[in-house]
Image: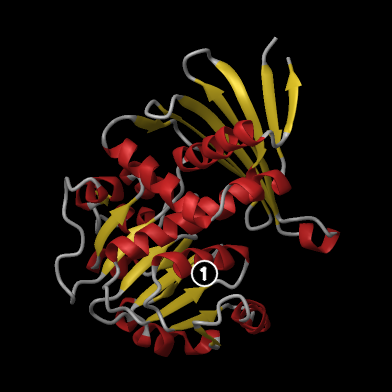
Amino acid sequence: MYPLRLLDRSHFEKLVGIPEAIEGVEQAYRLFSRGEAGVFPVIVHQFEPGRREMDLKAGHLAGAGVFGMKMLGWCAENPARNLPPLAGLIIVMDVDRQQPLGILDGTPVTFLRTGAAGAIGARTFARKDSRTALIVGAGNQGRAQLLGLSFAMPQLETILVADILESQSARFVEEQQALYPRFKLQAVPFSGLSRATEESDLIITCTRSREFFLKKEWVSPGTHINAIGADMPGKQELEPALVASAKVFADSATQVVAKGECQHAAKLGLVPAERITEIGTVLEGMKPGRLSAEEITLFDATGMAIQDLMVAAMALNRAEKKGIGTVVHF
């Protein structure tokens, strides 16, 4: 028999916050660039495009001694049923003994690690004098990105928020302003996206869009873009010409040309894979990041299993020391 620790949302939130998630995700990127971590082919399936989707990611962290997988499902109708739209599980296994260590609620882990990924992308590639950020997508992922920015980009002053559902962006600002009083949050109409884009030093796109809405002609020199929303074939937020005009960074070059924002520009022959620099190589000093205040930079983040595994393993280690969670024996 072996012990298996179960952590639900309440357990996880006592163990890991955004600072720890940023630390864990950065370490995962570094291990990946050093060949001490890897991911397996991602499985995605759209039961009904734009309504019901599944996502299965798996990987291993030799540097942390774990491997495992995350399975997520998304259903557009769930909020009307008083259910979360996103739900899933993370299973963490021990490399040495090849036995399960724990099972975690995948939703809070995904929220934190994606916010952490955006934070690291902004901190690494945005200009240090950035003052205005634009978040396009006022849903749960927009909240995760704002949380990450609050820790990684303290120099920001104004956060513009846009959503195709304008009532949602207004509600987002009303809810979040009290949580982040040092920022000036401002809802902008989706019809005014061009002006908001021109005014922004940093842009985060985190929608489920399947056609681009951010145009090359709107983006000012020196802007950094975190493209978070496109994480499976068919999704798109940026005009391919904009992607082609940017200096492109990614969590995984292989993943982004297959299912990230770069998929569309790659199919058109505008962005070959060899032009894409993985963020871990920049963090490790193997390759350069931003080289001038004028270049447009893009971080295409599709999400990697090793991010989830690193954050989940961190939570399990802390839970064992603190006696948190439910332990069952198999």
Instruction: Classify the position of the N terminus by image quarter.
Output: top right
Quadrant placement of the C terminus: top right
Q: Which residue is mark 1?
A: 146
Q: Where is residue 157? Give x, y as percent.
A: 42, 84
Nearer to me, 9 or 171: 9
Question: Measured along the vertical axis of the image, is residue 89 above or below residue 16?
Answer: above
Answer with left or right where residue 271 lies relative to residue 113.
left
Residue at 53% x, 28% y: name it.
68
Tell me where residue 173 appears, x and y as whole percent: 61, 82
Q: Is residue 327 visible?
A: yes
Left or right placement of residue 121 versus residue 208 in this view: left
List x then y, in percent, for residue 106: 63, 43
The residue under the point 44% across, 24% down is 65
**Which residue: 75% across, 22% down?**
328
**Residue placed most toward the observer, 126 or 193:** 126
Question: In front here: 235 or 247?
Answer: 247
Q: Can residue 234 be seen here?
A: no
Residue 69: where, in percent of width, then height? 55, 32
The image quadrant of residue 138 is bottom right
